[in-house]
Image (tube, rainbow, N blue to C red):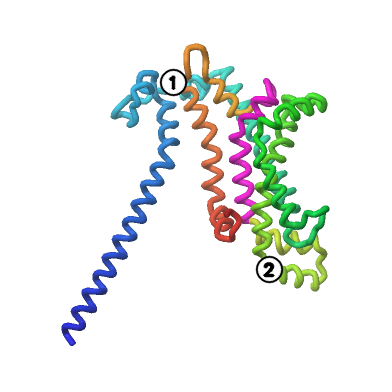
Amino acid sequence: MAEQIFHDGEADLGHRARRIAGRTAIYGILALWTLICLFPIYWTITTSFKMAPDVMQGHMVPFVDFQPKWKGWDSLGLSPRLIGQDSTVREEFLKRFTNSAVTALAASALAVILGSMAAYGLSRFRYRFGFMRNSDISFFFLSQLILPPVVLALPFLVLYKQLDLLDTRIGLILLYTLTVLPIVIWIMRDQFQSIPVELEEAALVDGLSIWGAFLTIVLPIALPGMVAAFILSLVLTWNEYFFAALLTSTDAKTLPVMVASQTGSQGINWWAMAALSTAAILPLVIIGIVLERYIIKGMAAGAVK
């Protein structure tokens, strides 16, 4: 009996050791992957405080490899020394930042509204358009992402010139909405399909209309998925460069175009580009932190696959 107890205890100890070793390995891999993912952000932020020799020599650790300077932020008029003074560059940066914020937020919100309604219809009703059924229509929306943006450059350039939408925020908003709409439809279609139809049927029996059931029953349940779709759309539209560079010149130019313009005949102003990139990344990081719980709920509900 004592020998059996000893063997059982030894087996339990071995099982516990393997479990601890497995968890340690998993957390170690996750920590390593976190460092790999965060390193570009760390590199960008530290580069905004470097001088030219520090950038070229690859110095990485502030106060150890190099002494931080405000050179990158001076170039934007955002350093403590210049923040209280008039700065043409700072006014230009704030204008580009406002353009990016307005176009990205408006396009993402519009795409989520239109995409949610389209996805709800595809998940609850049966449609027939020629040989196409619901699944074919959904795939058609998603297939629009296969088309390279450069193929659409000339048609949109001619169209926007005729409609007088070149170098306007509304032009970018409409184009960005079309760009992210297929992704929103695909995400929200899966989200609505995961919600039991019986909930809406019970609401209809209680006297609500289809719109009433959608707004009062379905929409609150699908809110995490909508937030996840909104954030994904926001990231894509905020970082879009090709159409912003093609269809804007002065008034509606966005931050990505301004970041790319930090190159000249004498090379790349790495410190200025890093400061601009840091300022462009920060709003997305803040939004991600604030809406983190909705993102997790959306992923758990199957909104992001």
What amino acid is found at the position of numbered circle 2 in the picture?
Answer: Pro
Where are the magenta residues, as a range?
A: 224-253
User: Is 279 left, or right, of 174 in this rendering?
Assistant: left
**Mark 1 vs mark 2: in front:** 2
Residue linked to disc 2: 196
Q: Quadrant of the C terminus?
A: bottom right
Disc 2 is placed on an element classified as loop
| Mark 1 vs mark 2, CA separation in Å | 57 Å
Q: How many marks?
A: 2
Instruction: Indicate yes or no whether the magenta region holds residue 287.
Output: no
- Residue sitting at 52 percent across and 36 percent down? 281
- Residue sitting at 63 percent across and 43 percent down? 233
Which one is nearer the viewer's eye here, 233 or 124? 124
Q: Which residue reaches farthest left?
A: 3
Q: Which residue reaches farthest front?
A: 131
Residue 153 position in % (x across, y down): 70, 28
**Mark on residue 71?**
1
The answer to whether residue 295 is above or below residue 10 is: above
What amino acid is found at the position of numbered circle 1 in the picture?
Answer: Lys
User: Is 168 left, or right, of 304 in this rendering?
Assistant: right
Q: Quadrant of the N terminus?
A: bottom left
Instruction: Say few, some or many: other residues with alpha carbon within 10 Å of mark 2 (under 14 / 14 to 19 / 20 or more).
Output: few
Residue 68 position in % (x across, y down): 37, 25
Contact flag, marks 1 and 2 (Cβ < 8 Å): no
Disc 1 is placed on an element classified as helix
The answer to whether residue 139 is above or below residue 168 is: below
